[in-house]
Amino acid sequence: MIVALFVAAGAAITYNTLQMADLQNTAKTQLEINNNAYAYQQGLDQIQFGTLMYASDNTTQGETIIVNSADIMQPAQTYLVSALADNSSLLTEFNQVVNLDQNQINTAISQVYSLSIGNENSSQKYVDIWTQLSVLMNAVAQADAKLVDVRSTTLANVESANTDAKNYANMSLIVAVVFLALISVVSAALAVVMGKRITGPLKKLADIAHKVSVGDLNQRFYLKQNIDIKTGDEIDELVDAFRRMVNAFRMTAALSGEEEAPQETQP
Amino acid sequence: MTVEQDFLAVLAEDLGPAAKIFLLRQCRSHLNKEPSMLEKSDIDNLAKWCHIGIQTALGAQIADKVQKGLLALKQEP
């Protein structure tokens, strides 16, 4: 029974541990998604900043910033498309961000490039550049908002996984305490039962031995009545040996008495 | 093993250390011989006297058991 309790407790705690490991993996994945979404968001902000610098005649610095942002965004996009494959709502939201990037943001950047490198120096050129910059900023703002949604969802998932993991940890603790208490109670009960099983016959045997020791050889009969318990262990052997010893006493006493008494008669 | 040793082995199961003196007493009193002189042909007679002696001192149950054990010695080679 104690072994069964140990097995049950082990199974329950192992199940909880496996669940916690799953939740830990989930939280890790969600955090990586969150980090990559943040990287993509930073990349978009850098593109916007680099384009503004380019339009402000800081073309070299602007180009550098735009190229660097692409280096950040490309691996983030690859990871997010793969990691969000089993989460259709977040994938849809991220695809909308990618569409904004590819259609509106890249188009606006190209337009700003074209307009900026033109020789024309009219006020219309700056109006057109400003128009494209407005389109760019608007698209980046929309993409930012969607990426914030993605990040909020992933952070909520991390929080939920952490809460569930804490619940499983608490459950493991409760299971361990409950089973420990059960095992202690069962062990104590078994100890009492086993103790009585051993000490009961021994106590009776000790009482009878005491009476025999003061000459009451009729204890042979009490021995049979009181300690006729087959425990199947060393106590049986002890009781048998004691019976034999009492028989020997009685036989010796009988033979001593017969020396002066008439002998047994033929049956 | 000799017949005496066989008898002592069976008697000692219930009589313990009193087996030897009991056997000596029964042999001398009823067969007029020493235990060391016992033969297989004495088994029936001696088993009977042992039964009587044990029944008197320890009761019929033990006497029957011992007699059965002694008579079984006839079957041994």
Image (tube, rainbow, N blue to C red):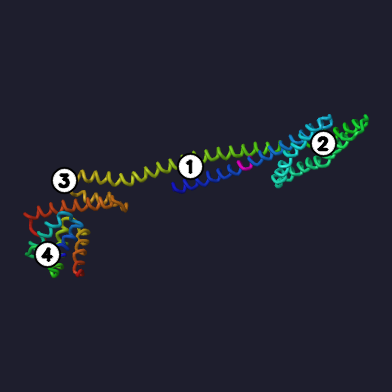
**Residue for point 20% across, 53% down:** A244
Residue to which mark 4 is pinned: A266
Mark 1 or 3: in front is 1
The chain containing the residue under callout 2 comes to: A
Residue to which mark 1 is pinned: A179
Residue range highlighted in magenta: A23-27
Residue type, numbered disc 2 = Ala
User: Could you tell whether A66 is left or right of A210 in the image?
Assistant: right
As drawn, A221 above or below A183: below
Callout 3: few (<14), some (14-19), or many (20+) C-alpha neighbours within 10 Å?
A: few
> A46 or A19, which is in the foreground?
A46
Callout 4: few (<14), some (14-19), or many (20+) C-alpha neighbours within 10 Å?
A: few
Could you tell me how far apart the alpha carbons at marks 2 and 4 are, in whole angstroms?
129 Å
Residue to which mark 3 is pinned: A215
Residue type, numbered disc 3 = Gly
Q: Which of marks 4 and 1 is nearer the N terminus?
A: 1
